[in-house]
């Protein structure tokens, strides 16, 4: 008796055409569900991105920043703005502190009316899992900021010690986060802490170039989560193989003259290149020199257009410009 190919497949235990069709339907459903989940996550990630109205507005200070993503809206770079006046009702908090006899907290809150904060983070990668870490940092930072206002009336290094220790317990050293958080005051003072992040650049309007900054003013610490702080009271619960981080200290720079520009940036800008030709810092400086008289947003747009014309990015690129006007 001659057996046809289908009979031989069935006899050998191979799936039938009917089973193949069912398997294909199941795979299609799984792919559709996965696509829907990815779309949901992309929507969440977009909601965490700063909106135009969130960029701080302070007298005498012009600020703008954004990310040039490598792959769609989901990536490892992240910016958070803190315009304390816009985000929080400081007058209500000040009155509440005074009623409780907390005069120093009330004074600190009053000073926040003259101050704006910005956090720039860079997760080591630009995939969905990297965006998850950026989202974790986003939420922990903003929730922690609320407690800081209640307890101190200002942002303190305690918040960043807690974030660092929390990330140390929940993430892998193979996937780290660099971060810089700074606050600009209307008098031109920029106070910041750095966790493994590139130091700020200051472009002098008077001298028409990036200024040399003494290393003592640019103290940095290991990336977020790579090692716990020496001040962590729970160190004995999880010893660190890599050692322990010193307590964060705050650096301070000053934009002394009108037209001075401070620049925060991520790896994507620092390492941008075309063959063996680097974009940073010579060409970047030249672009800023050409348009230094423009508002911060126009300067950012000039950098973005020139950078993209120079070479396709190999990573997410983010920068924030703070200009003294």
Image: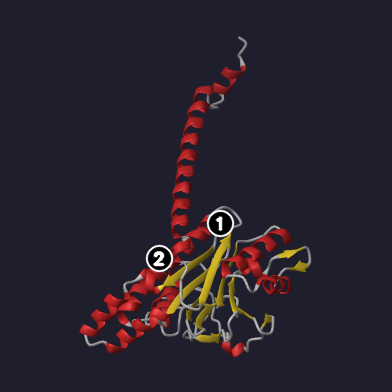
What residue is drawn where x is 44% and y is 63%? 53
- Label 1: which secondary element: loop
| For marks 1 and 2 on the same chain, the one whose residue lies earlier in the sequence | 1
How would you rate the neighbour count of disc 2 (Cα within 10 Å): few for under 14, some for 14-19, many for 20 or more?
A: few
Question: What percent of the width, then of the height, locates residue 47?
Answer: 44, 57
Question: What percent of the width, then of the height, locates residue 162?
Answer: 40, 76
- The quadrant holding residue 314 is bottom right
**Foreground residue, 219 or 87?**
87
- Label 2: which secondary element: helix
Q: Which residue is mark 1?
A: 127
For this orientation, the residue located farthest to the right is 276
Horizontal side of residue 317 vs 31, given as left or right? right
User: Does 124 sit above or below residue 108?
Assistant: above
Question: What percent of the width, then of the height, locates residue 96?
Answer: 24, 79
For this orientation, the residue located farthest to the left is 99
What residue is drawn where x is 45% and y is 46%? 37
């Amino acid at each position: 008796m001659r057996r046809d190919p289908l009979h031989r497949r069935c006899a050998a235990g191979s799936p039938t055409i009917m089973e193949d069709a069912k398997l294909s339907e199941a795979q299609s459903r799984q792919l559709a569900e996965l696509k829907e989940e990815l779309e949901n996550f992309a929507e969440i990630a977009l909601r965490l991105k700063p909106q135009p109205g969130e960029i701080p507005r302070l007298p005498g200070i012009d600020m703008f920043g954004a990310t040039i993503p490598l792959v769609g809206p989901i990536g490892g770079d992240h910016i958070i703005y803190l315009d304390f006046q816009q985000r929080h009702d400081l007058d209500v908090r000040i009155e509440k502190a005074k009623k409780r006899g907390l005069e120093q907290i009330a004074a600190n809150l009053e000073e926040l009316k003259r101050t704006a904060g910005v956090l720039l983070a860079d997760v080591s990668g630009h995939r969905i899992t990297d965006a998850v870490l950026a989202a974790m940092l986003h939420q922990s930072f903003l929730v922690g900021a609320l407690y800081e206002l209640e307890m101190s009336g200002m942002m303190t290094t305690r918040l960043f010690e807690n974030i660092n220790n929390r990330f140390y317990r929940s993430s892998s050293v193979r996937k780290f986060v660099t971060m810089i958080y700074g606050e600009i005051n209307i008098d031109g003072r920029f106070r910041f802490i750095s966790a493994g992040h590139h130091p700020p650049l200051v472009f002098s309007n008077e001298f028409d170039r990036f200024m040399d900054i003494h290393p003592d003013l640019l103290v940095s610490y290991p990336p977020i989560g790579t090692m716990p702080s020496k001040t962590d009271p729970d160190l004995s619960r999880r010893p660190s193989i890599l050692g322990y981080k010193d307590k964060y200290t705050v650096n301070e720079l000053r934009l002394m003259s009108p037209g001075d520009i401070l620049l925060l940036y991520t790896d994507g800008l620092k390492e941008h290149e075309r063959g063996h030709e680097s974009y940073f810092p010579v060409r970047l400086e030249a672009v800023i020199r050409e348009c230094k008289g423009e508002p911060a947003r126009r300067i950012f747009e000039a950098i973005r257009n020139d950078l993209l014309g120079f070479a396709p990015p190999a990573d997410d690129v983010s920068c924030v410009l703070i200009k003294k006007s």
